[in-house]
Each structure stands twice: as C-alpha cells, then as structure tokens.
Image (cartoon, grey):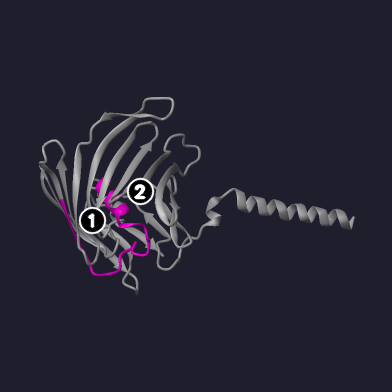
C-alpha cells in the first residue's frame, strides 16, 4: 500500500511538471519588471463594446523575445550570436487559421537585407536598408515583390519597388528626426515626416533591439499613426510631435504622456482621431 501511494504521488508530480512546462512557452520567458523594460501595454478603444487589448512583452537573457497581443498577433524575435535574425508572426488565438508570417534579416556589407512574407499570400517582399559608418540607418529601398517559381524555392520578381526613404537622425540622441519618401521612378518626393521628442527616457529605451529595426518599422508604419505604433519611436526619448507633408497637405499629430518617478512614460496618448491613451507597465 505504501509503495502504491508513493508511486501515485510520483506520477502526480510528473504530470504537474509536464503540464506546467509543455503547454505554455511563456513560462520559459520573463515578463514585467525587467530592468526598466516594458512588461505590458494596454490598448484601449473608443467603442464601449470593444474590450481592451493587452500586449505582453517577454524577455530572455535581457533580450526581447516575444510580444503577445491577446486576440491579436504573437511576434517571436530570434537571434544568432546576439544578432537579430528574424521575427516570426503567428495569431495569438490558435483557432485562427491565417496570420502566420516571417521577416528575415541578413547583413551584407553596410546593408541589411530584409525579406518578409505573410499569409494568406506566398509572395515575398524585399527591402535594402543602408547604414552609415556608425551603423545609423540612412536609406531604405523597396526592391520589389517576388513569387515562388520553381520546385527548389526559386523566386521570380513580379513587381518592382515603388519607393525609397531617406532617414535623418540626431547623431547624439539617435532619435529619428526626419523621413523623406521618394518615388523610385521619378525621384519626386512623395511625403515628408518630421519628428520632435521630449528629453525624458524613452519608453522602449531599455529594449536593446538594433536601431535599424526601428527604422524599418518607422518606414513600414509611416501611415499608421496609432499610439501603439508610435511607441516604437521612443528609442531614446519620447516622440511629442509628428509633422506630415504629403500631396494632400500638411497635418500635425501631437503625443502626450504621463510619467513615473523616473520620468519614464506610463501613459501615452495623441490628438489624432480621438484615440484614448495606452498605458505602459514595467
């Protein structure tokens, strides 16, 4: 009887161990309160019928490893030799079929080659991001869209790129202060974006992703000015104003903050579309 009880207890302990370690990869990661890094962002909506979205940030060995938006997307950051090599996207809701994708990064001389695809399409998009001698992003160029054309993974270009963008950074703070988008075919300016910042520590200043990654995101999200997207401009300080000049005219977006005792933002809002502020915990 005693041996049976001991055996049963051993089995129960093993089951608890397997359940706790196998069903949730987040258990192997560290979240809120890691050396001043964001742990959770709450995105609110003006529609009272829409539930707030919680975005969790996870870290491993002091590196951002995952962001998970409830009922949204999971982004997994993958590294080799401490260098960011890819970001894999999947739906947080496992019952959602589409929503998988991948963005890969490879360095060639002074350029970062970026290749990205996402469901439901199998097409691949390619960009080249140029760096100066100090690894500051200076230009990103759309190289075009490619489709699989052979059994061995060959790709054929099906569409040329339309735009390239030139970046201007404050060499001291590493804040992005201007982005000018040009049409590749004509070299005419399609849009100009100027950014102003406060002097407080940026909300993501403790997330040590490479500066070029944020330049890539600034280009990709230049027309999507919701507050959560602009959180990732806060590489050193916090963006306060965005001046956009396009063929339709000029527009200005202002961003506002509430700070903690360390002068780090715990709330970030804007005057665009009346969107409510996001809250940030560390």
**Is 45 above or below relative to 238?**
above
* Segment colored magenta: 193-220
Which of 16/116 is in front?
A: 116
Image quarter of the N terminus: bottom right
* Residue where numbered disc 2 is placed: 48
Label at residue 132: 1
In-image side of 249 versus 65 (left or right): left
Question: Label 1: how many residues lie within 10 Å, few (<14), some (14-19) or many (20+)?
Answer: few
**Is 177 above or below relative to 151?**
below
Q: Where is residue 64 in the image (x, y as percent from the top left)?
A: 43, 57
Residue under the image location 44 percent in, 52 percent down: 79
**Is 147 above or below relative to 116?**
above
Q: In which quarter of the image is residue 261?
A: bottom left
Mark 2 / mark 1, whichever is N-terminal: 2
Residue lying at the far bottom of the rendered structure: 261
Which of 264/185 is in front?
A: 185
Of tags 2 and 1, which is closer to the observer?
1
Q: Quadrant of residue 171?
A: bottom left
Label at residue 80: none
Residue lying at the far right of the rendered structure: 1
Visible residue check, residue 34: yes
Query: Would residue 125 be counted in the magenta stretch?
Result: no
Q: Position of residue 105 (x, y in %)?
A: 36, 46
Q: Position of residue 187 (x, y in %)?
A: 11, 41
Image quarter of the C terminus: bottom left
Q: How far apart are marks 2 and 1 (CA)?
A: 47 Å
């Amino acid at each position: 009887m005693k041996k049976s009880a001991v055996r049963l207890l051993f089995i129960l302990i093993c089951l608890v161990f397997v359940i706790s370690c196998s069903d949730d990869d987040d258990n192997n990661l560290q979240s809120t309160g890691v050396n001043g890094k964001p742990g959770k962002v709450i995105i609110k909506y003006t529609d009272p019928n829409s539930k707030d979205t919680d975005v969790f940030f996870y870290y491993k060995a002091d590196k951002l490893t995952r962001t998970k938006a409830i009922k949204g997307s999971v982004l997994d950051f993958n590294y080799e030799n401490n260098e960011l090599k890819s970001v894999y996207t999947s739906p947080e809701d496992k019952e959602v079929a589409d929503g998988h994708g991948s963005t890969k990064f490879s360095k060639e001389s002074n350029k970062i080659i970026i290749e990205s695809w996402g469901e439901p399409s199998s097409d691949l998009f390619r960009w080249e991001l140029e760096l100066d001698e100090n690894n500051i992003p200076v230009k990103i160029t759309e190289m075009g869209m490619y489709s699989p054309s052979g059994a061995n993974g060959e790709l054929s270009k099906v569409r040329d790129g339309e735009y390239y963008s030139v970046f201007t950074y404050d060499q001291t703070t590493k804040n992005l202060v201007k982005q000018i988008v040009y049409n590749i075919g004509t070299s005419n300016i399609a849009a100009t974006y100027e950014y102003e910042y406060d002097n407080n520590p940026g909300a993501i200043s403790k997330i040590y992703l490479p500066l070029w990654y944020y330049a890539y995101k600034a280009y990709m999200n230049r027309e999507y000015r919701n507050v959560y997207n602009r959180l990732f401009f806060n590489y050193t300080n916090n963006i306060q104003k965005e001046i956009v000049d396009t063929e339709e005219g000029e527009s200005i977006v202002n961003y506002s903050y509430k700070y903690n005792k360390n002068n780090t933002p715990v709330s970030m809002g804007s005057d665009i579309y009346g969107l409510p502020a996001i809250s940030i915990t560390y």
